[in-house]
Image: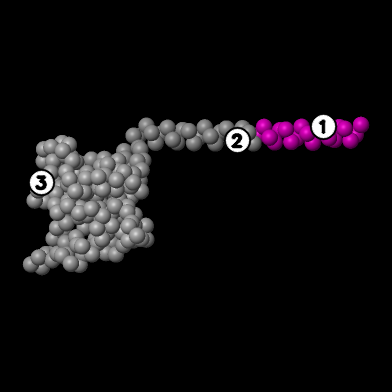
Amino acid sequence: MRRDRGRRRIYRSRALRRRRSAFVLCVLAALAGVVLAAGQSRGSERVTYDRRAAAAYADTWALSTNPAYWSSPDSDCADFVSQCLAAGDLRPLSGAGGDWHENGTDLPGVAWVNCAAQMQTLTVDGQEHTSYAAHVTKSPPRDWAAGDVVYLGNTVNGTTEWQHVIICAGRDHGQWVYDSHTTAHLRQSLELWYPAHFSLIRYCHIADSVSYGSRG
């Protein structure tokens, strides 16, 4: 009888501990839900950059122009890269860094079509969004990937001028290849542009995801 009573006490103690653990887990889950709801109420949202979609768009339109967008026969490189980034789900920007947005077949925002303005705008960590560019370097970063972009330029009269931008379309036979506009090129090696025609280069690794909404 004593053994039976002892076993019953052990079973009751174990059951009580299980109920307490279950209660603690419920409380923690409820708190996590509150935190998530609070973040959503502030309008925060994280969007993943779709690199495959950006690179696929680049390959599709590298040798032609999309009639849904404005285009220029004289200087269309930044416009083309902007279209590729938008195809990868990056959204228009408007703020201290500049205006990066398309405008149908009418002239878009300056940062959409100008290399220097585009690079500056994409690197800004704004109040309503995190930076579109994870980092900008003089040599290829380890995490270089399809959908990343390269800015090219020269020093003119002692001043740095960013004159061209191309987008990484992926690899061919183990080598990174790039698409571009103004002069249309499909899946060409970097040597076509640098250092053959440009003396300055910046590798712009696009962030894998961007957060939108209030950051306060």
What is the quadrant of the N terminus in the image?
top right
Mark 2 secondary-structure assignment: helix
The image shows residue 100, relative to residue 30, as above or below, that is below
Query: For the residues marked 3 and 2, what is the alpha-carbon distance in whole angstroms?
Result: 62 Å
Q: Disc 3 marks which residue? A: 72
Please name the residue shown 48% across and 33% down the image: 33
- List x then y, in percent, for residue 27: 56, 33
Magenta range: 1-20
Dot 2, how many residues are within 10 Å of its Cα: few (below 14), some (14-19), or many (20+)? few
Q: Disc 2 marks which residue? A: 24
Q: Nearer the viewer, mark 3 or mark 2?
A: 3
Q: Nearer the viewer, mark 1 or mark 3?
A: 3
The quadrant where residue 93 appears: top left
Please name the residue shown 44% across and 35% down the image: 36
Q: Nearer the viewer, residue 138 or 214?
A: 138
Question: Residue 3: within the magenta?
Answer: yes
Q: Which mark is residue 8?
A: 1
